[in-house]
Structure formats: C-alpha cells, structure tokens
Amino acid sequence: MFTLNCKGKLLTIDRPKVMGILNLTPDSFYSGSRFTNIDMVLKETETMINEGAFIIDIGGQSTRPGSERISATEELGRVMPAIEAIINQFPETIISIDTYQAKVVKEAVAAGVSIVNDISSGDMDNEMMRTVADLRVPYICMHMKGTPATMQQDAIYDDVTKEVLDYFIHKIARCKEAGIHDVIIDPGFGFGKTIQHNFQLLKKMEVLKQLGKPIVAGLSRKSTIYKTLGTTAEEALNGTTALNMIALLNGAAILRVHDVKEAAETIKLFEAYQYA
C-alpha cells in the first residue's frame, strides 16, 4: 500500500489504479487519443471517470520518438484551458500534468493539478525537481535515454533492467535531496528501448519493487505491441490488455492507458486471480 499527498489530499494506492491519457497534441502516435477542443476534453474526461480512472494525465507536448520540443508558452496554451475546464466541471478529479518543463508545472499546479509526470526525471529542465519540491506534489520519474528526438538512437544496454534499477536508485536519492517526498517510478517502456528491451524489462519489472515506490506501466498501444503483432496502434487494444495483465503480475501499481474501461476490467480480473 502507498499513500500520496496531493496538495493536502491523501490518496491511498491499496490496489492497482488506472491513469487515463488525455493528449492535447495534434501529433500523438495514437490518433484516438487526440482531443482538440474543450467539449471533446470534457466528454472524454467524464467517460474515463465513469469507467474507473483514478488519475487523468494531461499532456500538451508530444513525446513520441522523433518528436520536437515546443515552448512552455505553446504547451501552456494547449493544456491550461483543459485543466481549468476539468477542474471546474469535475472538481474532485486528480489530474497529473505530463510535462518536462518547470514553467508548465508551476501554472498547472496553481490551476489545480495534483501530480507531475516528467518523462525526463528532471534531466530536460534543471528547475524541475526544485519546483516540484516547492509545490509539494507527487512526482512521477520516468526512465529515458536521451530526448524524445534522439532516444531511439541511444537504445543500447548491457542489461536494461539493471540499468533502469540503477537509474532509479540515483533519481530517488536526487528527489530526496531536493525535498520531494512522494516519488512514483515509470520504467519508460518505448523510451530509448527496442522491442526486445521492452519485453526484457517487462519480464523482470518485479525487480523494481525493491525500490519501495509505486510503479507506473505505460504500455498502452505502443509500437512494441503493434509491431510485434503486425498491426497498428489503432488495432492494439487486445495486445495492450495482454501486456497490462503481465505488468500487474510483475508489480505495476498504476496502468497508464488510453482505454480506461478495459484496463479497469483487467485489474478486476487480476484481483480475482490474486485472491482466489
């Protein structure tokens, strides 16, 4: 069981949870997750909440392989109207901001965001960890080699699981030094890793439980699934469900997904299996 202090509201993770993905980018790798106006955002948020989402993860910066960085100003222009609309209509909703820019974090948290989800774990903005510590919100650290623009060129490991474990030992210590109390870890499936690396990491993900932190598994509709199956991101839901179950069996506490209903059903079946 884990507890997270979200701006004074204590959240308990005593069973696996679902994080629903809400992309406000025009070029997300999965076309079904692109939401371009507030009506679409509110409709999708309501659907995800009703289907069992514990956290809504909002992102305005594409992080697919080869994507280019946009300015904090442009990113804020994408995410702030959505954050404000969701907070207004669904005030009890826990929102995380998927960003690696501290300026975006400051404004998003001021507007009501409760969790920071940083794919770079502070490596792409030197102010990030200090900002998160000052704001006293939980921080999701993800493993990535390089940047989204270069990460697939850096996908070289002797032992991917050991390297990810060592990385998080270092990052958790950095977070503690900065004053961040609630750290969540994300192995970073697909970020600077080949398909083989992703399967190796998933197979041995349980090793990361020794860190004593909640683990996020972000496998939803990624190329590891659809390239292995010879299909597309649009047709990768069944494969996502299969790998999400493996992630749960290997220690995932949070499933970050495009399809909340199916993930919630996977968790229900996992729990029935665990407690049979």
Image: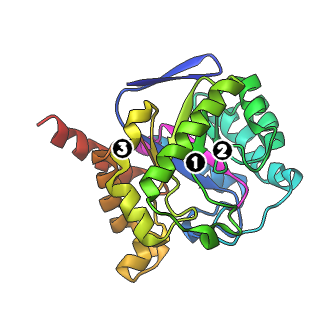
**Which residue is disc 2 drawn over?**
121
| Figure check: 73 above or below 183 | below
Residue in view at x 67 percent, y 53 percent:
39
Q: CA distance from mark 2 to mark 3?
A: 20 Å
How far apart are the two marked residues, 1 and 3, measured between alpha carbons? Answer: 16 Å
Amino acid found under the numbered disc labelled 3: Val
Q: Nearer the viewer, residue 169 or 4?
A: 169
Q: Is residue 18 visible?
A: yes
Give x and y (percent) for residue 44: 56, 52
Q: Is residue 101 above or below residue 34?
A: above
Q: Is residue 42 left or right of residue 129?
A: left
Which residue lies under the disc numbered 3? 207
View extreme (bottom): residue = 230
Q: Nearer the N terminus, badge 1 or badge 2?
A: 2
As drawn, 201 above or below 141: below
- The C terminus is located in which quarter? top left
Secondary structure under badge 3?
Answer: helix
Q: How many marks?
A: 3
Q: Is residue 144 left or right of residue 61?
A: left
| Residue 92 drawn at (x, y percent) | 58, 28
- The amino acid type found where label 2 is placed reads Ser
Residue 197's tag is none
Q: Which residue is mark 1?
A: 142
Query: Most extreme residue toward the left, as rendered?
Result: 276
Confirm or deny contact between disc 1 and disc 2 (CB under 8 A). Answer: yes
